[in-house]
Image (tube, helix red, strand yellow):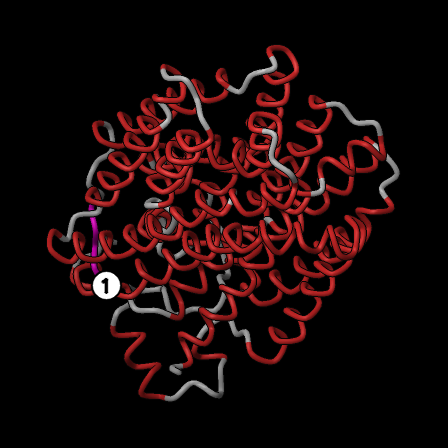
């Protein structure tokens, strides 16, 4: 295996642990709520607490990743979230769980800003779409696909407390692998051949071969209109994603009378669709960009995917809902949504090639903001109405609004190559 793809595999392992870890509480929700006397609305707040820590540190970790490199930030982040997982059984109640989830979110926040920078430093441009689709789409949906059956079995075998301790051990195992083998860039990896380094560098723009940056600038990030629209789109998709990640098991239990093990089996379908969607998105983004050389082609793919994701939920609003219809509609919504899985990160690299971690952190913070809002909104809707219909309406409307912005208000950025930049005359 080439060194660059071995590095991507380490990142895939990180994402796998990340998402199984953050979704674990949804499969332990029933015993946790029973043990601590937590209501549906309070569970929604606990779920949202994760994204409070995640959003704050997504903004902070992006510049940290660009300044100090991905390796150091990821290793420390993993250690923080492993400790948080191990402490979850000792949280003691509502406030304790909120605090533990905030710290867990803070530890997991560097994951995608760091993964985006690693992809930009370890891969030539023509390989990033597929790689980031694997990292941001397939690994995410795949972890939730296998996570349901694994976590429900762990709860049955070890109890919900034992499940969190096992997840903490998995995080420590990742650190033991990453310490010797995860490097910021090919130039820091003695085990990367000169031939592979030359190949990688041939597909990079000026400044993309650095392991870390000496200077950080927020101005170009905050003035980038495309990046703000990407943030809006990521928020819309995030609302649907977070709502289903935290509430799908309870929706299936309460709405259709399924047991915990049955929920683990039936919850596989949407995330399986997500794996397919992520693979399709990875292929599309590279092929269409190769043909058009237009950055806006990526926004078009995202916009159409969000439009289809929102439309997929409409039957749940107008037809009698059976278990089959619910699974089909939700699976289609998640599948179309995951087409965008890796494109957010490709767009972040395009927005700021020299500061991809910072740009990715900004986009990820928008995604995290939806993670704060969606679980709590769903919790209050369920508590007030006893139904999930209001949540489905919000998901569909947000997807339509974001799709319109991506399709009609993004613009093609002016791209200056390294050779063109050197040829521009200077005036003293």
Q: Main SS type for the magenta part?
A: loop
Q: Is 412 on the left-hand or right-hand side of 367? A: left
Q: Position of residue 381 (x, y in %)?
A: 59, 16
Q: Residue at x 76, y 35 (%)?
A: 98
In the image, 125 versus 318, the foreground residue is 318
Q: Is residue 358 above or below residue 174?
A: above
Does the stretch in magenta take in 416?
Answer: yes
Q: Secondary structure at mark 1?
A: helix
Q: Position of residue 364 (x, y in %)?
A: 49, 43
Q: Name the residue carrying label 1.
A: 418
Query: For the magenta stretch, what is the residue range?
Result: 414-418
Q: Residues within 10 Å of mark 1 (few under 14, many from 20)?
A: few
Q: Position of residue 410 (x, y in %)?
A: 24, 33
Does the stretch in magenta take in 165?
Answer: no
Where residue 173 sits, quadrant-wise, is bottom right
Q: Position of residue 413 (x, y in %)?
A: 22, 43
Where residue 76 sits, quadrant-wise, is bottom right
The single residue placed furthest to the top in the displayed view is: 385
Where residue 43 sits, quadrant-wise, is top right
Q: Residue at x 16, y 62 (%)?
A: 423
In the image, 121 versus 80, the foreground residue is 80
Q: Residue at x 48, y 49 (%)?
A: 358
Q: Is 42 on the left-hand or right-hand side of 330? A: right
């Amino acid at each position: 295996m080439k060194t660059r793809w071995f590095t991507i595999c380490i990142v895939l392992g990180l994402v796998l642990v990340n998402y199984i870890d953050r979704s674990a509480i949804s499969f332990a929700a029933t015993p946790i709520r029973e043990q601590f006397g937590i209501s549906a609305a309070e569970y929604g707040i606990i779920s949202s607490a994760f994204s409070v820590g995640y959003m704050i540190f997504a903004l902070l970790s992006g510049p940290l990743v660009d300044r100090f490199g991905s390796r150091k930030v990821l290793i420390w982040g993993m250690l923080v979230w492993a400790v948080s997982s191990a402490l979850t059984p000792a949280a003691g109640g509502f406030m304790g769980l909120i605090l533990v989830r905030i710290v867990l979110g803070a530890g997991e926040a560097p994951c995608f800003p760091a993964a985006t920078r690693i992809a930009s430093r370890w891969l030539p441009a023509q390989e990033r779409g597929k790689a980031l689709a694997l990292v941001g789409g397939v690994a995410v949906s795949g972890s939730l696909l296998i996570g349901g059956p694994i976590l429900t079995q762990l709860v049955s075998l070890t109890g919900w407390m034992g499940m969190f301790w096992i997840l903490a051990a998995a995080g420590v195992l990742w650190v033991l692998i990453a310490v010797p083998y995860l490097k910021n860039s090919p130039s820091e990896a003695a085990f990367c051949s000169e031939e592979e380094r030359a190949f990688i560098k041939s597909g990079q723009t000026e400044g993309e071969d650095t392991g870390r940056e000496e200077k950080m600038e927020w101005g170009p990030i905050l003035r980038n209109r495309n990046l703000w629209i990407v943030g809006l789109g990521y928020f819309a998709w995030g609302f649907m994603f977070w709502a289903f990640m935290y509430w799908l098991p309870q929706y299936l239990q309460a709405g259709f009378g399924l047991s915990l093990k049955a929920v683990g089996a039936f919850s596989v379908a949407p995330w399986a669709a997500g794996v397919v969607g992520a693979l399709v998105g990875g292929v599309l983004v590279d092929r269409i960009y190769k043909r058009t050389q237009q950055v806006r082609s990526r926004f078009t793919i995202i916009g159409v995917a969000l439009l289809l994701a929102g439309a997929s939920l409409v039957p749940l609003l107008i037809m009698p809902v059976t278990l089959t219809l619910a699974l089909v509609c939700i699976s289609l919504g998640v599948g179309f949504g995951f087409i965008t899985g890796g494109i957010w990160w490709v767009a972040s690299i395009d927005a700021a090639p020299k500061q991809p971690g910072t740009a990715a952190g900004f986009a990820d913070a928008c995604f995290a903001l939806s993670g704060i809002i969606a679980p709590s909104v769903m919790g209050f809707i369920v508590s007030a109405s006893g139904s999930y219909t209001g949540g489905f309406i919000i998901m569909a409307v947000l997807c339509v609004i974001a799709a319109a912005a991506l399709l009609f208000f993004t613009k093609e950025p002016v791209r200056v190559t390294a050779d063109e930049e050197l040829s521009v005359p200077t005036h003293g």
